[in-house]
């Protein structure tokens, strides 16, 4: 610190420096950012085991103020008639690339209000992209293959993540404060939310229980709102 800023700004930096020193003396870092961590468990139908923890999206939104988010560019490859990964969380304004790695044609589209797009048919080695401006959870399909489904979850916060394969998750560098924690999973009817106070030292062991025991896979329509010729059974 010090040496940065001119005039009034420099003065503010100095005062901030004093605050940091005072806080260090008290054992608490000023402007503290801690890691928030937890674990998701999913109730399945009797006898079934969860295999898709990684498709869980977790994010923290401050209860006051609007955090600044930067758009990014990420990839959901198309491989073996699947989106890889199947679920991606991005900040509002981000772009998702859909490179086709299969030796045949795909047609990625979304008919959800807030993120309407139709990338048209394109073959092996080609890539097209879609921009996601509005927060929400958007199913993404292929007009050629009835069972191809992916999800883009768009958030307006910089504090988000996806669970690992065992359901554990971690969001680093969360400033102390009050947040709404949201846990989303495609097989759960509504996201689970809770208000949490994040102390300067962060939070560990936030347990969230999701209920997917009532989940039923429903065939979706093609980009023209019609049933697929294959009815989603055969590719
Ligand atoms: Cu396809």
Image: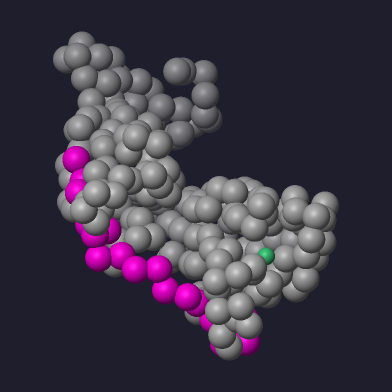
From which residue to which does the magenta span run?
207-225
Q: Examine the rendering and report whether any part of residue 80 can be seen.
A: yes
Where does the N terminus fall, quadrant-wise? top left
Residue 91 magenta-highlighted: no
- Front in this rendered view, residue 182 or 101: 101
**Taking 109 as reference, is 8 above or below it?**
above
Dominant secondary structure of the residues highlighted in magenta in the image = loop
**Ligand 1's quadrant:** bottom right
The quadrant in which residue 120 appears is: bottom right
The quadrant in which residue 93 appears is: bottom right
Percent x, y of residue 71: 57, 52
Percent x, y of residue 100: 74, 55
Describe residue 180's horizontal placement relative to residue 158 as left or right.
left
At a point 53% along the width and 60% down the height, the residue shown is 150
- Front in this rendered view, residue 70 or 167: 167
Percent x, y of residue 233: 55, 71
At a point 20% along the width and 38% down the height, the residue shown is 206
């Amino acid at each position: 610190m010090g040496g940065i800023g001119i005039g009034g700004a420099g003065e503010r930096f100095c005062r901030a420096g004093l605050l940091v020193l005072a806080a260090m003396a008290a054992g608490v870092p000023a402007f503290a950012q801690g890691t928030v961590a937890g674990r998701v468990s999913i109730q399945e139908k009797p006898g079934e085991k969860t295999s898709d923890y990684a498709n869980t999206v977790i994010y923290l939104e401050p209860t006051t103020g609007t955090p600044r988010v930067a758009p990014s560019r990420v990839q959901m490859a198309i491989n073996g008639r699947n989106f890889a990964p199947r679920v991606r969380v991005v900040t509002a304004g981000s772009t998702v690339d859909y490179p086709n790695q299969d030796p045949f044609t795909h047609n990625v589209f979304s008919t959800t209000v807030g993120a309407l797009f139709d990338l048209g048919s394109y073959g092996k080695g080609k890539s097209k992209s879609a921009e996601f401006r509005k927060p929400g959870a958007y199913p993404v399909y292929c007009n050629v293959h009835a069972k191809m489904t992916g999800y883009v979850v768009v958030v307006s916060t910089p504090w988000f993540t996806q669970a690992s394969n065992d359901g554990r998750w971690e969001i680093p560098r969360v400033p102390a404060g009050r947040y709404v924690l949201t846990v989303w999973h495609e097989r759960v009817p509504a996201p689970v939310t809770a208000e949490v106070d994040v102390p300067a030292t962060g939070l560990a062991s936030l347990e969230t229980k999701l209920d997917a025991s009532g989940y039923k896979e429903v065939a979706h329509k093609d980009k023209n709102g019609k049933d697929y010729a294959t009815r989603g059974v055969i590719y």
